[in-house]
Image (cartoon, rainbow, N blue to C red):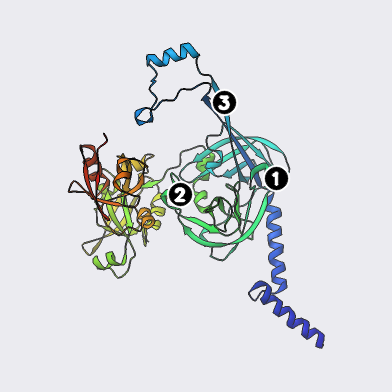
Amino acid sequence: MKRRGIFSGLTLLMTFIVTGAAFSFSEMADMEEAIVKVANIAGKAVVSISSEHTTKVRSGRRFYFNYPGGKSPFGEDDPFRKFFEDFMGEMPEREYKEMGLGSGVIIDPDGYILTNEHVIMDGDKIKVTLPDGREFKAEVKGQDQRSDLAIIKINARNLPAVTLGDSSNLKIGQWVVAIGNPFGFAMENPEPTVTVGVISALHRSLGRALSRDKDYNDLIQTDAAINPGNSGGPLVNLRGEIVGINVAIFSTSGGYQGVGFAIPINNAKRIISRLIEGKKVLYGWLGVTVQDLTSDMAAYFGLPDKNGVLVAKVLAKSPAEKAGIKESDIIKGFDNKTINNVRELLSIVGSAEVGKKIKVTVLRDKKEFSLEVEIGERPDDLEKIEGVSSGVWRGLEAEALTPENVRKFRIEEESGVVVVDVAPGTQADQAGIIPGDVILEINKQPVKSVSDYEKLTKKLHGDALVRTGRGYFLIKESE
């Protein structure tokens, strides 16, 4: 009896030492069994995807000249070009094959596979390898660049498939399993790799700089190891249900550092049927530029908290303008749902049905009222329409003060345009302009928006006196 008591005490002590929490060995065994079961069942439906894209590049002897702007002196109709081609012969074209590697998960026994759009993007030939080693040619049924999701199909039947779960009830700290094929076929084994971790955070955003043309504004963050080649593979819960599609890692070295991201499966559920049917995925659009409220802004508008979003710009002829939404309005509600921040508004507007009339609650001059807006279709060239980017002027590129730019450069100014890039050796670089500078004036003319900036720079000749948040800079005209 005494020995049994000692062992009981040791068992309890080891429970705390090994796990750091009050888990019994039986509970740990149950978790281990669950992970093994998930790996065995869901792993059979995870595939390797290789895509091949062929490009043609002129090869042979080439001529390089120092030429203003770095452009070749030989245009298509240039007589000198014809002379050199007659003398040297037409430069032949060589084919180069670009290979892409990733993962996918079977969601239907008839061969429908869910993956990332960037895994199969521009693929002329797509090959799928099952865990049992069988290989199939795949057909792209549908792809959507904004969501970074795609559906491909192989000609096979009675395949193992994984059930789509519910990502709306995920909790931070919840155990998850990432399954995929890191490093592609380098392992020379078609069986997928399984890693385990927890949900580290929810509703993460990668921002414009990392997202580019993708909508990475509502991601699941996990510490389950995700490495190159895992993209498109599933993130599953301990019931073996897909809760996310692995999409990216955040790393300073290109390797795993404990921060991975997945697209919530509920985002995929909304568009899977359209992808399978090969239809274009439609996204709702208001036609406004919005920003989160700061504590100072909330106090200025007489608000008790920072909940809501401030309308910074209303685009001409947009659904918002037609509905009567104005700049400096604060959107407090959308479709009978409370709006607390920009992320929530973007998510709910994007998923709204195009053409549907929806009630929007706004606060204007401390009075709250409702407007009815008919949801428009998000344009493909939205950035151009919104005037987010200004193009390049004298070596610098400027953008609107978006929430992402404000956070990235820690901007305090409430108007102007932010410099996001400066080409080395250009007039702007020589003047001392750096990324993060906020341009407030050009030649003593105020710059409050990208529109103001473009109007001033298009008609500008000669040297330009530019006032930024750091002071004045003289940007000379090119000689």
Query: Which amino acid does the dot numbered 2 rest on?
Result: Leu
Where residue 474 appears, as percent x and y from the top left, is: 24, 46
Q: Earlier in the sequence, mark 1 or mark 3?
A: 3
* Label tally: 3
Q: Residue at x 32, y 64 (%)?
A: 294
Q: Mark 2 points at which residue?
A: 210
Q: Is residue 376 visible?
A: yes
Answer above or below: position of 216 versus 458.
below
Q: Nearer the viewer, residue 96 or 435?
A: 435
How far, Cα to Cα, is label 2 from label 3? 31 Å
Where residue 66 appears, as percent x and y from the top left, is: 39, 27
Residue sitting farthest toward the bottom: 2
Query: Which amino acid does the dot numbered 3 rest on?
Result: Glu
Snapshot quadrant of residue 98: top right
Q: Earlier in the sequence, mark 2 or mark 3?
A: 3
Q: Earlier in the sequence, mark 2 or mark 1?
A: 1
Q: Can residue 316 be seen in this view?
A: no
Answer above or below: position of 69 versus 83.
below
Q: Residue at x 70, y 67 (%)?
A: 30
Q: Which of 414 and 176 is in front in this view?
A: 414
Query: Which amino acid does the dot numbered 1 rest on?
Result: Met
Where residue 179 appears, as percent x and y from the top left, is: 64, 52
How far, Cα to Cα, is label 1 from label 3? 27 Å
Q: Mark 3 points at which residue?
A: 95
Q: Name the residue under label 1.
A: 187
Q: How crowded is mark 1: few (under 14 residues within 10 Å), some or many (20 or more)?
A: few
